Image: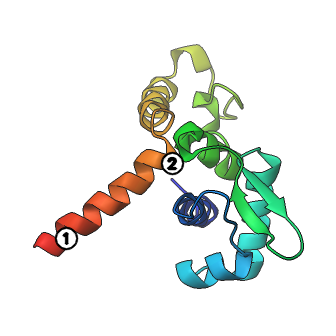
């Protein structure tokens, strides 16, 4: 499940993706416009910067911006930076596998195999969705809601 940290990070990325090229945004503005605690958002944006998705600039004209075009930022990458592996349980993770204490044979565990399928399905969607596509979905949804 996506944590609040992951959700707020994605909201901030959508906000930054909608800026005009070359523009930056202050944490306080992103926080206020997206109803997120500034202190919490500071930590989230720092993680996204360390993960290579954002760049920051101090001083006048400073703030945060995407480090590359939204079309090159995978939602799966952002979620992994903020929330860790996509697998619903550790034993189904490709990158952070950890055997369960109660499992006698991980290779024959039906729960593990089923959760690996869930992991693969989540990964297939999030790794193939770019930030640009997410922004477009938001815009498309708003237009459709206005028609109703």
Disc 1 packing (10 Å; few <14; some 14–19; many ≥20): few
> What's the residue at 60%, 44% (across, down)?
69
Residue 53 point in image, percent of width and height = 70, 47
Q: Is residue 18 above or below residue 97?
A: below
Q: Are marks 1 and 2 in contact (CB under 8 Å)?
A: no
Query: Residue shown at 82%/49% (left/top)?
Result: 50
Task: Kindly give the residue lying farthest to the left in the view shown.
Answer: 148
Q: Which mark is residue 86?
A: none
Quadrant of the snapshot with the C terminus: bottom left
Q: Residue 71 location, x and y as percent? A: 52, 40
Instruction: Identify which residue, 101 or 52, lies in the foreground.
Output: 52
**Residue at the extreme right of the image, as rendered:** 59
Badge 2, how many Cα within 10 Å: few under 14, some, many 20+? Answer: many
Q: Is residue 101 in view?
A: yes
Whether residue 88 appears in this view of the structure is: no
User: Where residue 62 sits: x, y (%)?
Assistant: 81, 70
Q: Which residue is mark 2?
A: 131
In the image, residue 125 sits, relative to residue 4, either above or below, namely above
Q: Quadrant of residue 38?
A: bottom right
Q: Quadrant of residue 142?
A: bottom left
Q: From the image, tell me which residue sits under label 1.
A: 145
Please report the residue visible at 54 percent of the width from the left and 78 percent of the height from the top: 34
Q: Nearer the viewer, residue 82 or 31?
A: 31
Which SS class for mark 2? helix
Q: Count the labels in the image.
A: 2
In terms of image quadrants, where is residue 91? top right
Front-most of 147 and 37? 147
User: Which residue is at 89% across, 69% downward?
Assistant: 58
Q: Secondary structure at mark 1?
A: helix
Question: Sequence-wise, which precedes: disc 1 or disc 2?
Answer: 2
Q: How is the image coloured?
A: rainbow
């Amino acid at each position: 499940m996506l944590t609040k940290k992951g959700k707020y990070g994605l909201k901030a990325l959508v906000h930054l993706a909608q800026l005009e090229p070359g523009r930056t945004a202050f944490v306080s503005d992103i926080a206020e416009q997206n109803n997120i605690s500034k202190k919490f958002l500071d930590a989230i944006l720092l993680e996204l910067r360390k993960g290579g998705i954002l760049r920051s600039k101090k001083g006048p004209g400073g703030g945060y911006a995407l480090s590359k075009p939204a079309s090159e930022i995978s939602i799966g990458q952002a979620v992994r930076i903020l929330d860790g592996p996509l697998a619903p349980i550790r034993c189904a993770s490709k990158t952070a596998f950890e055997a369960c204490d109660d499992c006698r044979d991980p290779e024959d565990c039906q729960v593990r195999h089923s959760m690996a399928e869930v992991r693969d399905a989540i990964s297939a969607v999030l790794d193939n969705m770019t930030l640009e596509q997410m922004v477009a979905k938001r815009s498309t949804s708003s237009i459709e809601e206005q028609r109703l």
